[in-house]
Image: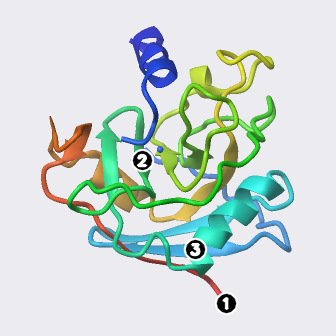
Amino acid sequence: MRRTLLSLLLTIPLFISASVVSTSALAQDNPIVVMETNKGTIKIELWADKAPISVANFLRYTDDNFFDGLIFHRVIAGFMIQGGGFTPEMVKKPAYEPIKNEARADLRNKRGTLAMARTSVIDSASSQFFINLVNNKFLNHTNNTPRGFGYAVFGEVIEGMNVVDQIAAVKTASGMGGQDVPVEPVIIISAKRQM
């Protein structure tokens, strides 16, 4: 199944992103983003000390209120939930230019981490992100080839994994130009830096 998912990830753009989350102390300068959804609140620590390009990119969209009103448009139980690109009508919102992929071997796609969604092109990530529901080892950086480069992890959920799990449990269907789309929209009401 993992081989099938990897094949899907490399051939189709990722546009359509007992809980154990790290309890280590937050890095002093790492920003926190509070994401309000119609399913509840998700609090995210962004790893500016480990993935500065991806974090700056995510904060650019956050500070511009870009995510407000968008949806988690791709939900696959046992894999990930993805958002940051589409309206509830499944209209793709124009994004800024793609960024450099910062995937590296020591930043793993573990349960509760956020990573940048992309196409099969290594440096194609823009606004879309996903939250890993499980340890997705096959998404990690292993080498510099298109297949092995991986997906850049840039933060983790520090509160609200129960909300992430509720989103993961919603009913999905194919339609409106996507697959695994929630039947009832899961809306990002707002995403704001915690001051």
Is disc 3 placed on a helix, strand or loop?
helix
Q: Residues within 10 Å of mark 3 (few under 14, many from 20)?
A: many
Discs 3, 1 touching: Cβ within 8 Å: no
Query: In front of the other: label 3 or label 1?
Result: 3
Is 154 placed left or right of 161 in the picture? Answer: right
In this view, 30 is above or below 190: above
Q: CA distance from mark 2 to mark 3?
A: 16 Å
- Which is more toward the observer, 12 or 20? 12
Across and down, in percent, residue 101 comes to: 74, 39
Q: Hey, what amino acid is under mark 2?
A: Gln
Residue situated furthest bottom in the rendering? 195
- In the drawing, does residue 147 fall left or right of residue 5? right
The mark nearer the N terminus, 2 or 1, is: 2
Residue on which the image places disc 2: 82
Kindly indicate whether the residue at mark 1 contacts the one at mark 2 (C-beta within 8 angstroms): no
How would you rate the neighbour count of disc 2 (Cα within 10 Å): few for under 14, some for 14-19, many for 20 or more?
many
Position in image of residue 11 (x %, y %)? 46, 19
**Residue of label 1:** 195
User: Pointer 3: what residue?
Assistant: 62
Q: Amino acid at mark 3?
A: Thr
> Gap between marks 3 and 1, in whole Å?
13 Å
The residue type indicated by label 1 comes to: Met
Label 2 and label 1: CA atoms lie apart by: 25 Å
> Which residue is at a point 25% across and 38% down the rendered structure image?
178
Q: Residue at x 60, y 45 (%)?
A: 115
Return the residue nearer the eye: 73 or 50: 73
Residue 193, horizontal then vertical, whole percent: 62, 81
Res. 26 image quadrant: bottom right
